[in-house]
């Protein structure tokens, strides 16, 4: 498996689609790569067309306090990234440079800032929506897109440390959240099918940490809270999750204090497309030159 990962990564680097930055899971992207990402984004927007989602764009960070409140530190501490910075005096600075020059751990004197790296694009949305007060009768629907960080270094080009998600986030009643998710499970299959990619949809779980994590993962599967759309990229036996469809029940509603128009705790759901993973799937199945892709696929991507 890891041979197939390395081989595909090397091919992408050789063709200049990814640009090495010297760290596994951290790459630059070529204009062709970005054009494909733009195409996927376009197809997503087109499918969502008349839904009337409110667009929000956030930087790739959330407040450290928001990360703490989200519960992510409990479920997935191994993936978290926090931003640290130097906050010392001249003397501390000299000591830091000395340590650096000796090859020591110059980061020891760094302190955490108020910023953490975004683990999932929808995390910025819940506190913003909660702060507005009760939702309207129709609930809330938010369109987000941005970079996420997850500390999972890998030579698999589909497992990046910094990658983009395009998401729609639904907040409202249980029925509104579930209807939204069902709609997107169908839509996503139409979109990915229009890209000429093979896929399957399956129930899934988040990579929860530790022993309690195993229990959380089992009950998440039993309750069918998470579905994934999987596309074979480097392996047919272990296809890659390219989109996910998540129903959080009232977890985020309770966590953030999001209320429905009727004053109940809101239920939430999100659909997330992995923009790099779908790009990598397209490059794998149709070749490295989008100009030579089937006309129908180019059309679906608006290329
Ligand atoms: P996996 O099980 O592969 O770790 P996940 O279940 O953690 O993925 P989600 O949290 O559901 O993924 O994220 C939504 C989408 O973001 C995924 O379906 C995938 O397309 C993309 N994604 C997740 N992790 C990565 C990553 N490390 N590199 C690139 N894309 C990713
Ligand atoms: Zn989400």
Image: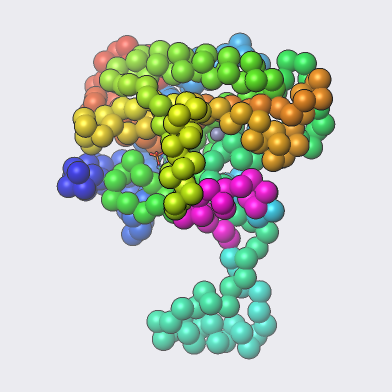
Judging depth in this view, the residue of 160 and 207 nearest the camera is 207
Spot occupied by residue 212 in the image (x, y as percentages of width and height): 48, 49
Residue at 49% across / 87% down in the picture? 98
Residue 238 versus residue 64 in the image, above or below: above
Q: Is residue 124 visible?
A: yes
Spot occupied by residue 251 in the image (x, y as percentages of width and height): 64, 35
Judging depth in this view, the residue of 54 and 294 nearest the camera is 54
Q: Quadrant of residue 253?
A: top right
Q: Quadrant of residue 179?
A: top right
Residue at 58% across / 18% down in the picture? 178
Residue 278 versus residue 293 in the image, above or below: below
Spot occupied by residue 293 in the image (x, y as percentages of width and height): 26, 20
Q: Is residue 147 visible?
A: no
Examine the structure image and report whether residue 79 is included in the region drawn in magenta: yes
Spot occupied by residue 3 in the image (x, y as percentages of width and height): 17, 47
**Magenta region, main secondary structure:** helix
Task: Give the extent of the magenta segment.
Answer: 66-83
Which quarter of the rendered picture does the C terminus lie within? top left
Judging depth in this view, the residue of 291 and 21 nearest the camera is 21
Seen in the image, is 231 located left or right of residue 167? left
How many marks do you count on the picture? 0
């Amino acid at each position: 498996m890891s041979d197939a990962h390395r081989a595909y990564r090397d091919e992408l680097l050789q063709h200049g689609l990814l640009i090495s930055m010297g760290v596994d899971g951290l790459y630059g992207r070529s204009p062709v790569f970005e054009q494909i990402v733009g195409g996927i984004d376009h197809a997503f927007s087109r499918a969502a067309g008349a839904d009337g989602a409110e667009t929000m764009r956030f930087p790739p960070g959330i407040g450290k306090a928001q990360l703490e409140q989200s519960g992510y530190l409990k479920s997935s501490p191994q993936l978290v990234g926090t931003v640290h910075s130097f906050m010392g005096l001249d003397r501390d600075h000299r000591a830091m440079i000395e340590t650096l020059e000796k090859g020591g751990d110059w980061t020891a004197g760094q302190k955490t800032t108020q910023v953490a790296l975004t683990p999932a694009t929808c995390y910025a949305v819940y506190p913003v929506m909660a702060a507005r007060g009760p939702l309207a009768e129709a609930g809330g629907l938010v369109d987000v897109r941005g970079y996420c960080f997850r500390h999972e270094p890998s030579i698999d080009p589909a497992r990046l440390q910094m990658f983009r998600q395009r998401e729609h986030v639904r907040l409202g009643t249980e029925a509104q959240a579930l209807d939204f998710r069902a709609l997107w499970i169908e839509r996503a299959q139409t979109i990915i099918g229009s890209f000429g990619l093979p896929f399957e949809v399956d129930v899934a779980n988040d990579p929860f940490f530790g022993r309690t994590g195993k229990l959380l993962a089992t009950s998440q599967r039993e309750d069918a809270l998470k579905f994934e759309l999987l596309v074979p990229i480097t392996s047919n036996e272990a296809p890659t999750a390219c989109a996910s469809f998540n129903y959080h029940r009232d977890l985020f509603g309770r966590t953030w204090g999001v209320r429905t128009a009727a004053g109940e705790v809101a239920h939430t759901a999100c659909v997330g497309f992995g923009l790099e993973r779908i790009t990598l799937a397209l490059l794998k199945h149709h070749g490295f030159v989008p100009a030579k892709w089937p006309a129908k696929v180019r059309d679906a991507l608006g290329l």
